[in-house]
Image (cartoon, rainbow, N blue to C red):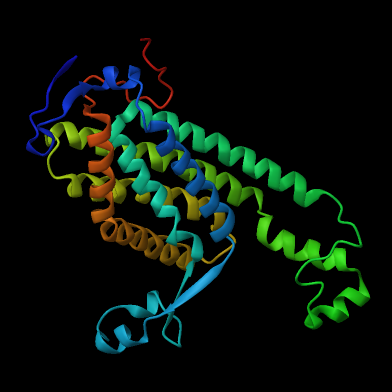
Amino acid sequence: MQQSSSSPASASLARLDGRSGARRHFRLFDYAMVAFVAILLLSNLIGAAKLSWIDVSGAVSATPWLPWHWLVNDSGKMLFGAGILFFPVSYVLGDVLTEVYGYANARRCVWAGFFALIFMAFMSFVVVAMPSAAEWGCAQSGDPAYAGLVKASSAGAVCQSTYVSVFGSTWRIVLASLLAFWAGEFVNSFVLARMKVMTEGRFLWMRTIGSTVFGEGVDSLIFYPVAFLGTWETHSVVVVMVTNWALKVTWEVVLTPVTYAVVGFLKRHEGVDVFDDNTDFSPFAKAPVA
């Protein structure tokens, strides 16, 4: 089904329903999917292992009535996982994919990212488990600060320890990451697609932020309890879960102008606007036959 869109913002675009959008070949879709999967993998691989901080002592002093003790330590620093700086970008791209190409095409990207994460976890497990050669050298083994450890063991042993600290993950964290990503991304795409139909394509900012609130909420509700409940204190799990969810949603709000620009660029070049009027929203639905 194809007709002109009733949305003022996309009046010059051909309107496609969900099934037609799923069958259509788009010129830039493959590039968008590659960007989505690449950012997903890199944010999990590079940023996830590092704990960082931001000094919010000025804000604490200016607003002493707020419950800052839940969020900051005694020196006024708020700790957070470095991965949250870039992982939310995958949700922004998920919004773009659903908004421009429809839920069915976004579903393909989620499954591609899910299986890519499984392969990354499997590859990390295999490589980390392999024995390290004593002659293996790295930045730490050449650092004078580690000279005693190298002498007591070997350069390879020191490098293996640092390698495990970066690429090694417990089965709980791996499972939590997979489940949280899968559920969160599908909720994000579903909410955005339904809101687009309800609003007739208006209020993009409301759809992207609203879908992120629910998608990141599901992501956080699954990841932190599955990964850390019983290992961390329950209070710490709740605090980190809520603060990280709030930071991710805030990041979505900050990136709203970027989302508008990317969506506008892709729609102009594709020439269509996909509305999921008659879409099967099951994550396991097969793509319609052309």
Q: Residue at x 40, y 53 (%)?
A: 88
Q: Quadrant of the N terminus?
A: top left
Q: Position of residue 194 (x, y in %)?
A: 22, 33
Q: Position of residue 182 (x, y in %)?
A: 46, 38
The number of discs equals 0
Q: Tell which of 90 and 231 is nearer to you.
A: 90
Is residue 221 shown left or right of residue 162? Answer: left
**Looking at the picture, does residue 21 appear above or below residue 31?**
above
Q: Residue at x 80, y 65 (%)?
A: 159
Is residue 9 shown left or right of residue 75? Answer: left
Q: Residue at x 31, y 41 (%)?
A: 96
Q: Tell which of 190 and 104 is nearer to you.
A: 104
Determine which quarter of the picture holds residue 108.
top left
Q: Tell which of 251 and 24 is nearer to you.
A: 24
Determine which quarter of the picture holds residue 277.
top left
Q: Position of residue 130 (x, y in %)?
A: 83, 49
Q: Residue at x 54, y 47 (%)?
A: 41
Is residue 5 shown left or right of residue 185? Answer: left
Is residue 283 shown left or right of residue 232? Answer: left
Q: Quadrant of the C terminus?
A: top left
**Looking at the picture, does residue 65 appear above or below residue 224?**
below
Q: Position of residue 52 (x, y in %)?
A: 51, 72
